Image (spheres, helix red, strand yellow):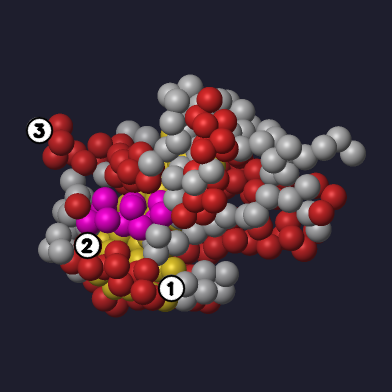
């Protein structure tokens, strides 16, 4: 049956930024499809909630509360997965994000930090995970990028630049790691997570975002999680080096900060 191709039974997935939002939703979706999990984020209590949901599905879960800006801690996730479960099959690089700022307020240090958080952390974990993936034949990597890596708007110079880098890094890494490891990305549009709550809880702002989104709504976490399952599972086995745009069809920024001309 076609639905069987979306199963990942017996596989082990690492998900970063898994305490809430897209990371948590993706981790639970992977558990629903049969994967055991290594979930990492800064806040243990949030990870405990994700673990409880996954364990309720019969999955095994290792929670790792850590600072994902620390590259030693990031790379250590691969060895923890190996020692706990004996393998790594799926890697979801979800951790990232940058607060928008006007260009002249975006210091070189801020841009460097954004690149570190959104790209270097993913690269570090990929380097640590790939040798262990190869021990069991290969695997699948899914990087969470953003539609702001493709469209342009004021205030997004750091965030959009680093997410564009993540998208192209995905294309490049897919060539280095083919054929045994597939590497794809999701360019996520505006999604109803806690990070967007201040916007979605304001009716005027929410309506404005919906008006410029062709499908007429803001994304749900499950929209992104479903794409993660597709790319990570045998259902997506003929895809590598692709950036899947899950953005409601929007081709302009859905959130306009109203920054004035200089």
Mark 3 surroundings: few (<14), some (14-19) or many (≥20) residues within 10 A: few
Closer to the camera, 80 or 216? 216
13 w.r.t. 161: above or below: below
Task: Say whether marks 2 and 1 touch (CB < 8 Å).
Answer: no
118 w.r.t. 201: above or below: below
Name the quadrant containing residue 251: top right
Find the residue positioned furthest to the front.
Answer: 203
Q: Secondary structure at mark 3?
A: loop
Q: Nearer the viewer, mark 3 or mark 1?
A: 1
Residue labelled with disc 1: 43
Residue 119 place in picture, x, y as percent: 58, 55
Name the quadrant containing residue 234: top left
* Count of number-bearing discs: 3
| Residue at the image position 51 percent from the left and 38 percent from the top | 203
Mark 1 surroundings: few (<14), some (14-19) or many (≥20) residues within 10 A: some
Residue 106 place in picture, x, y as percent: 78, 54
Task: Say whether marks 3 and 1 touch (CB < 8 Å).
Answer: no
Q: Which residues are magenta?
A: 21-31
Residue labelled with disc 3: 1
How far is the residue under mark 3 from the one under mark 2? 24 Å
Name the disc covering residue 56, or none: none
Residue labelled with disc 2: 54
The answer, for residue 150, to whether it is visible in the render is no
Residue 44 place in picture, x, y as percent: 38, 75
Closer to the camera, 162 or 50? 50
Closer to the camera, 103 or 37? 103
């Amino acid at each position: 049956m076609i639905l069987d191709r979306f199963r990942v039974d017996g596989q082990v997935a690492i998900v970063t930024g898994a305490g809430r939002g897209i990371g948590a939703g993706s981790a639970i979706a992977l558990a629903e499809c049969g994967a055991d999990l290594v979930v990492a984020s800064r806040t243990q209590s949030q990870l405990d909630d994700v673990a409880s949901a996954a364990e309720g599905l019969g999955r095994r879960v290792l929670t790792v509360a850590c600072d994902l800006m620390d590259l030693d801690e990031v790379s250590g996730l691969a060895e923890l997965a190996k020692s706990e479960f004996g393998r790594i099959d799926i890697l979801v690089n979800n951790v990232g994000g940058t607060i928008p700022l006007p260009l002249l307020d975006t210091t070189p240090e801020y841009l460097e930090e954004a690149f570190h958080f959104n790209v270097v952390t993913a690269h570090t974990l990929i380097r640590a995970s790939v040798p262990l993936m190869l021990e069991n034949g290969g695997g699948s990597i899914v990087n969470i990028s953003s539609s702001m890596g493709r469209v342009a708007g004021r205030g997004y110079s750091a965030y959009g630049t680093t997410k564009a880098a993540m998208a192209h890094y995905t294309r490049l890494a897919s060539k280095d790691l083919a054929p045994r490891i597939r590497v794809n990305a999701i360019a996520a549009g505006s999604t109803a997570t806690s990070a967007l709550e201040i916007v979605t809880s304001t009716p005027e702002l929410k309506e404005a975002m919906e008006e410029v989104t062709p499908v007429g709504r803001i994304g749900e976490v499950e929209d992104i999680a479903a794409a993660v399952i597709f790319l990570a599972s045998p259902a997506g086995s003929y895809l590598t080096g692709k950036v899947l745009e899950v953005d409601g069809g929007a081709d302009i920024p859905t959130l306009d900060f109203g920054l004035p001309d200089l």
